[in-house]
Image: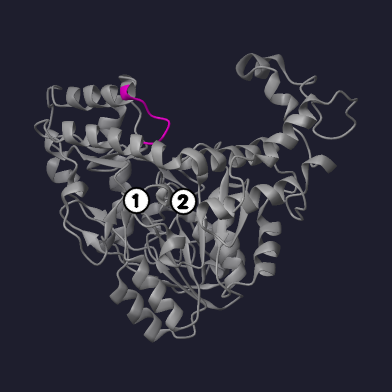
Amino acid sequence: MLNQNQTPLIDALKACKTRPHAPFYTPGHKRGAGISPLLTDLLGKDVFLADLTELAELDNLFKPENAILAAQELAAEAFGAEKTWFLVNGSTCGIEAAILATCRMGEKIILPRNVHSSVISGLILSGAIPIFIQPEYDEDLDIAHSITPEAVKAALAKHPDAKAVLTVYPTYYGVCGDLQAFVNLTHQYNIPLLVDEAHGAHFHFHPELPTSALVAGADLTVQSIHKTLGAMTQASMLHIQGNRIDIDRVNKALQLVQSTSPSFILLASLDAARQQMAINGEKLMFETLQLAEIARSQINQIPGLSTPLAKREKSPGFIDLDKTRLTINVSKLGLTGFAAEEILNQMGVTPEFSSLQHLIFIISLGNTKEDINALIHGVKSLTQIPQLTSQYNICKYRNDDKIDYISCLSPREAFFAESEILPLEKTQERICAEIICPYPPGIPVLMPGEIITQSALEYLQQIQTMGGFITGCADTSLRTLKVVKV
């Protein structure tokens, strides 16, 4: 057992920060002396003393031997991994590295269609061929849940040459699929299960939270420590266990997608977040769960509002729910989630994201009772706004199960193919050459290599009409799209 009270990276950074010396190394601001006063007015001066490069005392991220190595070993033990890597380019680079480490050009990977855009980037970089599975769709709530064990079993039977299975756990709404079943199925084929656990870094630290991916037996998982724990934005971790993944390939893949000038402030925040959770994690998660329950119980008493996922019965695509993730359905108020978010923002309450019917809030160890009171007051005020029009029928429009997904090129082939830009109305039945997704949560509706269908175009236009916005495409107004040139 390691001493989880230790913080080797923070200690090393503190020593370098306070050591008097003349700096003739990067970064150019030289320990804050050259920073613009505009930035020091915003952040203060002290933080820039810690913005240091890979000095001998601070170790090297790509070949750690001292402080970084010790911090990663502590993190592996705290999160239940055999080996852990710190990530400074977010979970995006971890997902990309996971695909690069397990799939070569032309090899197949089985994965859900509602993956994050970072997965598509991994497919483009690796040249892997996606075998997409449609997730279970809740038509009443207009929410896609997890893929099911039956769907994974069928995909593996049809594609026994697949090199890996990737799943999202939890989804952006906090829904968890049957990860244990996925582990059993993939291991029958002796291939690894990769998990996008970006929103589940806290699972390991309280028994009332869903089972963590590593405890369930996943071979590799990527966690955004900054999303639900106490690290700084962009700070994430990649964990592995078992012998189905080549560690050397992970190392080489991370060298492709991580910065060679990592921020030691971000790395130190991972060291601090690990120590915080290893020592006080269960207490912090208990308090977080209490706050979430207060919010959920009081919101369910407000006429016209509901937290429907908390009441949903289990199914193959819905085994568990992260109780710190709060999804509120506002459609019965005659509001879209987009409109409700704008109103709440004006009241000083900011959700994680909105969709046609829902508002989604992340309740974490950083929230307070005052935050919860503001949330309850804000959403209660939504019910008192005079309804100018009822949009309930519009809110119930569509979903991914009504969009036709047809691939005819691999994402990599389409991404690097010669392309042209056409007016939106002339793109139907053409091959998409860019990633197009409503954001957040960044789940693509169209991706390189897919046929642009009328159903996909209608959905994207509907999202814009209702107040959402589209990212990934060159023309965010959606008047034009980039397609493969014929």
Residue at the spot 17% in from the left edge and 31% down from the top edge: 298
Residue contact at pointers 2 and 1, CB within 8 angstroms: no
The magenta stretch spans residue 404? no
Q: Secondary structure at mark 2?
A: loop
Secondary structure, magenta segment, majority class? loop
Residue at the spot 78% in from the left edge and 38% down from the top edge: 53
Q: Is residue 406 at least partly visible in the picture?
A: no
Residue closer to the observer: 343 or 393:
343
Estimate how packed mark 2 is, as few (under 14), some (14 to 19) or many (20 or more) residues with alpha carbons within 10 Å: many
Residue closer to the observer: 246 or 414:
246
The magenta stretch spans residue 366? yes
User: Which quadrant of the structure image shows residue 347?
Assistant: top left
Residue closer to the observer: 305 or 471:
305
Q: Position of residue 427 (x, y in %)?
A: 41, 59
Mark 2 vs mark 1, CA separation in Å: 19 Å
**Chain part drawn in magenta:** 362-369
Lateral position of residue 119 relative to residue 243, left or right: left
Q: Earlier in the sequence, mark 2 or mark 1?
A: 2
The residue labelled by disc 2 is: 198
The residue labelled by disc 1 is: 207
Residue flagged by tag 2: what amino acid is it?
Ala
Q: Is residue 454 at least partly visible in the picture?
A: yes
Estimate how packed mark 1 is, as few (under 14), some (14 to 19) or many (20 or more) residues with alpha carbons within 10 Å: few
Q: Position of residue 22 (x, y in %)?
A: 91, 25
User: Which quadrant of the structure image shows residue 290?
Assistant: top left
Residue closer to the observer: 386 or 99:
99
Residue at the spot 18% in from the left edge and 37% down from the top edge: 330
Image quadrant holding the N terminus, namely bottom right
| Rendered position, 207 above or below 189 | above
User: Which quadrant of the structure image shows residue 353?
Assistant: top left
Residue flagged by tag 1: what amino acid is it?
Pro
